[in-house]
Image: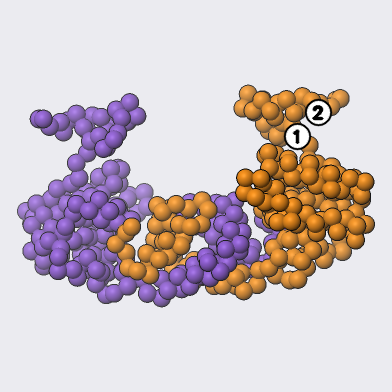
Chain colours: A orange, B purple
Amino acid sequence: MTTAPREIEELIELMAKLPGLGPRSARRAVLYLIRKRGILLHPLADAMHAVAATARECITCGNVTTTEVCEICSSQKRAIGEICVVEDVADLWAMERAGMFKGRYHVLGGTLSALDAIGPDDLRIPRLVRRVADEGITEVILALNATIDGQTTAHYIAEELEGRCAVTSLAQGVPVGGELDYLDDGTISAALRARKAL
Amino acid sequence: MTTAPREIEELIELMAKLPGLGPRSARRAVLYLIRKRGILLHPLADAMHAVAATARECITCGNVTTTEVCEICSSQKRAIGEICVVEDVADLWAMERAGMFKGRYHVLGGTLSALDAIGPDDLRIPRLVRRVADEGITEVILALNATIDGQTTAHYIAEELEGRCAVTSLAQGVPVGGELDYLDDGTISAALRARKAL
């Protein structure tokens, strides 16, 4: 609660709904926006309208896009036969920043979760199974989060695709630059089990 | 950097300029906005346009307002003769949330700073001196941050107003709910110097 005019009050309330912003940082952000009205507030409002008008889901993979089929799915340079399965678009972006994977993606839109009553049909799992058959996929790489729900989902998908194509998942181990003393026991155990000959 | 469409890329870049949001949280916020398009993205863009069109500075105190004179300055219920001086609008809102002060405000718009070459004329200090004379002010309460620059500014204002009205400042001491063990030495010393009879 502030004593600001109604318009500003409303903007603060909406900003506070963004992930990573609470009421206090929303107030700070709005005051900053008002100070930077010309170079930030107007452009931001315009950019939001533009995204609201154009953003949509890729009908193939579920990536966010402004065209019917996303840039990655429609690119001729992408390797055929490999699909990387991610939970959401942020994970797809993270994979692309790493720049190693040259195939196409499939965005599940979440993970299986008994607690939240999310089953396979609530995700893009049936569509993944169809793509594997239709696109002649030889390998599905599961890049799901190393959480309970992520791993449950990975196992479910691996079972669904059994006999249709190879199913692999990201290696678990010590992160690059990671110090053993700061790692949790589970990571160290996993890295030990997956040890490699030098 | 992501592989998102240009419109989304632009929105992420603008969002990342907000205080409290870095590139990573900006990406998360934008994906969240796209998912909540109807209930959040459209309303947020509209609210930003509304604020951009209406927000202005109160010509008396410097508060943010949508009218020429802000609600507090034009209120008949506010005590006459007392001005609380704050660095910026966020501090004014903080004072109002505390709900104790019944007078009017004066927003300096920053603090004196030799390092950033900010002098009295860059702040609303001359206007404060004029208000003290014009409005028959008897007490100016300095509610500036307990930083070096804040306290330098407080001393400067106290000198400017000497002989014109009483100048007081917020008490320094142990915060309500504060534990001594977690307080810095300066605060404990200040609280000890300002000790009171029970």
Give the mark, 2 or 1, whose residue is nearer the N terminus.
1
- Check disc 1: other Cα within 10 Å, few if <14, some if 14-19, many if 20+: some
Q: Is residue B29 left or right of residue A138?
A: left
* Residue at 80% over, 59% down: A127
Q: Chain of mark 2?
A: A
Q: Which residue is mark 2?
A: A194
- Within 10 angstroms of label 2, few (less than 14), some, or many (20 or more) residues? few
* Label of residue A125 in the image: none
Q: Are marks 2 and 1 in contact (CB under 8 Å)?
A: yes
Residue at x 71%, y 35% (from the top left corner): A176
Q: Quadrant of residue B195?
A: top left
Q: Is residue B141 above or below residue B122?
A: above
x, y percentage for residue B187? Answer: 27, 33
Instruction: Name the residue rendered at 9%, 51% in the picture.
Output: B166
The answer to whether residue B180 is left or right of residue B14 is: left
Q: Position of residue B171 (x, y in %)?
A: 19, 41
- Observer-nearest of B49 and A34: B49
Which of the 4 image quarters holds residue A193?
top right
Task: Look at the image and tell me whether residue B117 can be seen.
Answer: yes
* Mark 1 lies on residue: A172
Q: Residue at x 40, y 66 (%)?
A: A10
